[in-house]
Image (spheres, rainbow, N blue to C red):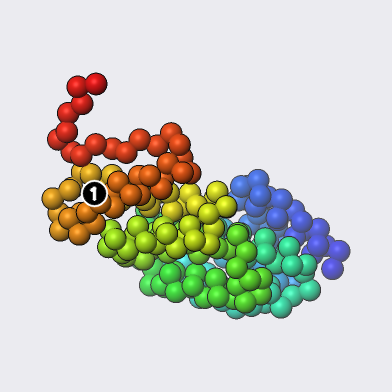
Amino acid sequence: MENRNKYLLLARRAREEDNSEDAKRYYDMVRTEDPDNAEAKFFYSYYRLMDGTVGEAGSKYDAMCKGVNTTISLILESDASDEEKKALVLAILAHLEKARIAIVNNAPGSASVNIQEIKKSIFAKYIEAFGEDNDIMFEVYRFKKDFESRSMKEKYEFGDEIESKFASVPQIMALALDLWKKCVAEQQTYYNTREAIECKGMAEKYAEKIKKYDPTYVMPKKAGCISFG
């Protein structure tokens, strides 16, 4: 037990310092001492994936992802404090995203697991345990913003949904502002498209909303407009 706790502390420290070599080594030691340690099983498989070859990437990624739901359940059912559980779940979400990006960039098409469905399951388990706190809702809305397809009008309205719940939380509101700014810019650039025409007047409306949160914001001019300032 003493060795396991020592190795787990060293593994976490290495992970926080982004020292992948030591993190992998110490998590492997934790696994040896405690084969059922959920944290060690996930992070060892993560570092094993990131340290592997391109040819192995897809199968290792799939193996890592398929064990995530069990890992999350074990963490939430463990004797760790709520803060430790929360920190671990958020760390796993962050490392899943790093792994996804690595696969997309280096071995596209090699993995078969649907990471979106896994993340949705993690969000559901987390919210059931801790409620809709700001940390998880930032991850939820960032996920929805990046992975769910929407029309221009729906993107404007999705930003409204965020604002209605989290107007006082700058980190989460930044997601809404990013959506609104991109929609306004797109509408000003491609103002003759069907989507832009259907959203007539919305660019001006949302430019004013943006200014409430970002007073330095300047609405872009329509493409082709010339300023004689």
179 vs 11, left or right, is: left
Q: Residue at x 24, y 36 (%)?
A: 221
Give the number of marks: 1
Of the 4 image quadrants, the one containing the C terminus is top left
171 vs 218, left or right, is: right
**Nearest to the observer: residue 129 or residue 170:** 170
Q: Residue at x 35, y 35 (%)?
A: 218
The image quadrant that residue 111 belongs to is bottom left
Disc 1 crowd, CA 10 A, few/some/many (<14, 14-19, 20+): many
Kind of residue sitting beneath label 1: Gln
Residue 126 visible in the current orientation: no
- Residue 73 point in image, percent of width and height: 64, 77
Q: Residue at x 71, y 50 (%)?
A: 13
Residue 13 visible in the current orientation: yes
**Outermost right residue:** 2
Of the 4 image quadrants, the one containing the N terminus is bottom right
Q: Which residue is mark 1?
A: 187
- Residue 131 point in image, percent of width and height: 63, 71
SS at badge 1? helix
167 vs 202, left or right, is: right
The image quadrant that residue 55 belongs to is bottom left
**Nearest to the observer: residue 1 or residue 211:** 211
**Nearest to the observer: residue 157 or residue 36:** 157
- Residue 211 point in image, percent of width and height: 42, 41
As drawn, 201 above or below 55: above
As drawn, 1 above or below 222: below
Q: Residue at x 39, y 62 (%)?
A: 158
96 vs 41, left or right, is: left
